[in-house]
Amino acid sequence: MDRGTRDEVLDHLAAAVGAVAVAHPTRVAVDGPPAAGKTTLADELAVVLRARGRDVIRATIDDFLFPRARRYLRGEYSAEGCYFDAHDYDGLTRVLLDPLGPGGDRRFRHAVYDHATDTARSAPVATAPADAVLIFDGVFLLRPELIGRWDLRVFVSADLDKTVDRAVIRERAVSSRADVERRWRERYIPAQRLYFATVRPAEHADVVVHNDEPRRPVWVSRTR
């Protein structure tokens, strides 16, 4: 277990990416609970890798959602709905992960969902260089449907109660504290606990980043 500065953990993650030896783009999962800090970490890692000359594809699970009517079939505050109904894993593997994986043609799309219209979308097709890096952040990325499609797995951990406080700050311009707390405590946190109990994602990660103190993170690397 190592503790260091933000720059040190980013340097460690960039080195881990560089150590992956595959004949196709390197697919990196940055998993973790909502408001754990995974999107920020993924954005910062992308900057570091680009500065080192890597071609980076940046994508997120939020662009692979099902429309609201489908993802809230069990109710707006259903934890089971959050875990089982929210994300289009077939679309994700079909248009992004498999094209960038072994035997893929490297022609990919980075999204299948449009937040503005709450409808499916057809993002432009792009072609990745063979040495590109996909940095993909989101929840539930190490579940059985996806776990074998990552070349490097990062899990960003944070105390779940702290994520509520972070979410209140992050969403204060659009949601009241009561609304945010209800979503987290009834939907998002129970869904994460279901994920932890059934998948044990931290045990499958190559690097676990404990992000309770973002400027002084603690990280653990594992050998598969």
Image (cartoon, helix red, strand yellow):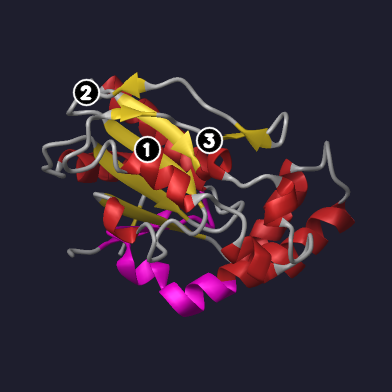
Mark with earlier residue (1, 2): 1
Q: Quadrant of the N terminus?
A: bottom left
Q: In this rendered view, identify the residue nearer to me: 141 or 2.
A: 141
- Residue density around tag 2, few if under 14, some if 14–19, many if 20 or more, within 10 Å: some
Q: Are marks 2 and 3 in contact (CB under 8 Å)?
A: no
Alpha carbon distance from label 2 to label 3: 21 Å
Q: Which residue is mark 3?
A: 112
Compared with 61, 52 (above or below) is: above
Q: In this rendered view, identify the residue nearer to me: 219 or 143.
A: 143
Alpha carbon distance from label 1 to label 3: 10 Å
Q: Which residue is mark 2?
A: 129
- Identity, as a three-letter code, of the amino acid under mark 1: Leu
Residue at image location 59% in from the left, 45% down from the top: 65
- Identity, as a three-letter code, of the amino acid under mark 3: Val
Q: Residue 121 appears at what percent x and percent y?
A: 58, 30
Q: Nearer the viewer, mark 2 or mark 3?
A: 3
Residue range highlighted in magenta: 193-221
Question: Is residue 135 at all visible to an observer of this figure?
Answer: no
Q: Which residue is mark 1?
A: 96
Residue at image location 21% in from the left, 23% down from the top: 129
